[in-house]
Image (spheres, grey):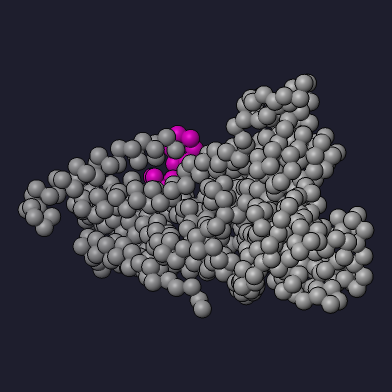
Amino acid sequence: SLALPEHLTYPLFLAATLIALVPFGRRALALARAGTPFSIETLMVTAAAGATLIGAAEEAAVVVLLFAVGELLENVAAGRARAGIRALADLMPRVALRLRADGSTEQLPADRLAIGDLVLIRPGDRVPCDGTIEDGTSALDESPVTGESIPVSRGPGEAVVAGSINADGALRVRVTRAASDNTIARIIRMVEEATASRAPTQRFIERFSEWWTPGAMVVSALVILLPPFLFGWDWGTSLYRGLAVLLIACPCALVISVPAAMASGLSAGARRGLLVKGGAALEAIGAAGTVAFDKTGTLTEGRPRVTDVVPAHGQAEHQVLELAAAVEQGSAHPLAKAILAEAASRELVLPDASNLAAIPGKAVTAMIGGRLVGVGSPRHAREAGAQLGVLDAALTRLETEGKTVAVVLADRDALGLIALRDEPRGDAREGIAALSALGLRPVMLTGDNRRTGEAIAVSLGLDVKAELLPDDKLREIGRLMEGGPVVMVGDGINDAPALAAASVGVAMGGGTDVALETADAAVLKDSVTGVAELVSLSRATMANVKQNVAVAVGLKGVFLVTTLIGVTGLWPAILADTGATVLVTLNALRLLRWRPQA
């Protein structure tokens, strides 16, 4: 319009509007046939048609464009559930080693394993089936499936779950569930069902349009048809004022009030590491009354670290840690890495160790200075005949605090204890307090053992439900939702069903691809305080939406009255409509300056 004369630009705006209205008009017609005659599509088509009738094709084209942008923003996450399910399926190994009767192995696809097959699982392998251990002892990292933060020792007769990782010893496992019914397959089904069963959030503007659109049409028709008979107006005047009323009622500002505010809110959040997949999720976050957290990797760091070193009488802390770290050299076990990291942070010089060996699921040993030094579980220490003496009281206290305790032995003498725990994130307490200040109830749902869960919960100041498998978490989310909308925050595979079933699922940025794909929002900066910031952003956005609707409806109400009594005419009506559109857009843009409260 700046480069060409009006007699050329106006037909272009008109053509653009009419072409763009074709798909929206078809959708409005289809919805009308299905029993929804006053849908948001009808609202938008009416707005554009009204603008073209009074010669404002430029405005009509802008309305269509803004509506299309709003539709795009509302559907950003159209395929997230399918992508989440694909990521879940990737947890299963492609092949498995099935043992033959003669003891040899054959490689075959994991999904062809049958109930009763015997499978060899080597150290470092991912478990390809649900089954029972027939031979071997090992520590299994079950955190991808159950959320248990510390690898769990498993031996003959104990169950293993598909998707967990074998840390050290070789295992022979008897398959107890077919591939279509193993733990990963059941989690996939739960994600699908939770996604399908959750009804889409009805957009605010759709609810508003149920009475706004038909009301505007009726009023406009009445202004055109009745005054010539009732008040003696000529038909030109009644048509003029009827079109003016239609223009005033054309919900241009109303149509863009929600998507404009949502777009600004989503952009403001994204710039601060708060990713929300669509306006419906952004609206729901601020309405929640409960926030449910996973523990491992969400409220905690997701990896164990040394919290206490308790030396026996006559020993020093650094000596105990030096010997333990020397024995653990070369081990890939998470507890070994934590001990080595602690020794490195203290800049300890490790003694020479030889004949390093592992007793799967129990301990690691090495020869140091002519003595057999071992680092293992308290049960292993007792089985080895070690007398803990005064260390017994410290062992009980540390275990009560939810910590995993390793005993350092030299031959059969207990040299000391090393306690480890997956500790809370540095900002976890601050984040929980911020949510409580906003009036939300925080609760922790964890697959970890009850003792550890309660210890972490007490330190952070929130309620806890522990020892929950994925289906248990799903049931707990359902129970919480009976009291109102629930936000679920997690980062692991085991959280995927709960993230999908909750009113809004929020993934921590450092979490797995499954959690990020399944969730409705993500805190990319991997901070617990980010959850409270999401709630604040949602509430600020919804406040902005309500302000926009009030401006759009209020201005129109004023000019509707003045037009009917003849005080204002067509051009003031156009100015009112355009002015309202500008005002709501500028108000929405204020959200781009949104900052989290300090």
Q: Residue 217 at what x, y percent from top left?
A: 36, 49
Q: Quadrant of residue 249?
A: bottom left
Residue sitting at x 14%, y 45%: 11
Q: Is residue 85 visible?
A: no
Q: Nearer the viewer, residue 146 or 465?
A: 146
Residue sitting at x 64%, y 74%: 346
Residue sitting at x 91%, y 54%: 383
Q: Residue 169 at what x, y percent from top left?
A: 74, 43
Residue 182's place in the image compared with 423, above or below, is above
Labels in figure, total: 0
Residue 358's place in the image compared with 282, above or below, is above
Q: Residue furthest front?
A: 370
Q: Which residues are magenta?
A: 32-43
Q: Residue 481 at what x, y percent from top left?
A: 68, 55
Q: Residue 427 at what x, y percent from top left?
A: 60, 72
Left or right, residue 176 beside residue 253: right
- Image quarter (top left, top right, bottom left or bottom right) of the N terminus: bottom left
Q: Nearer the viewer, residue 124 or 223?
A: 124
Q: Residue furthest top?
A: 101
Residue 470's place in the image compared with 547, above or below, is above
Residue sitting at x 35%, y 67%: 589
Magenta includes 580? Answer: no
Q: Nearer the viewer, residue 56 or 232?
A: 56
Q: Nearer the viewer, residue 432 or 552?
A: 432
Left or right, residue 378 beside residue 343: right
Q: Is residue 61 visible?
A: yes
Magenta includes 42? Answer: yes
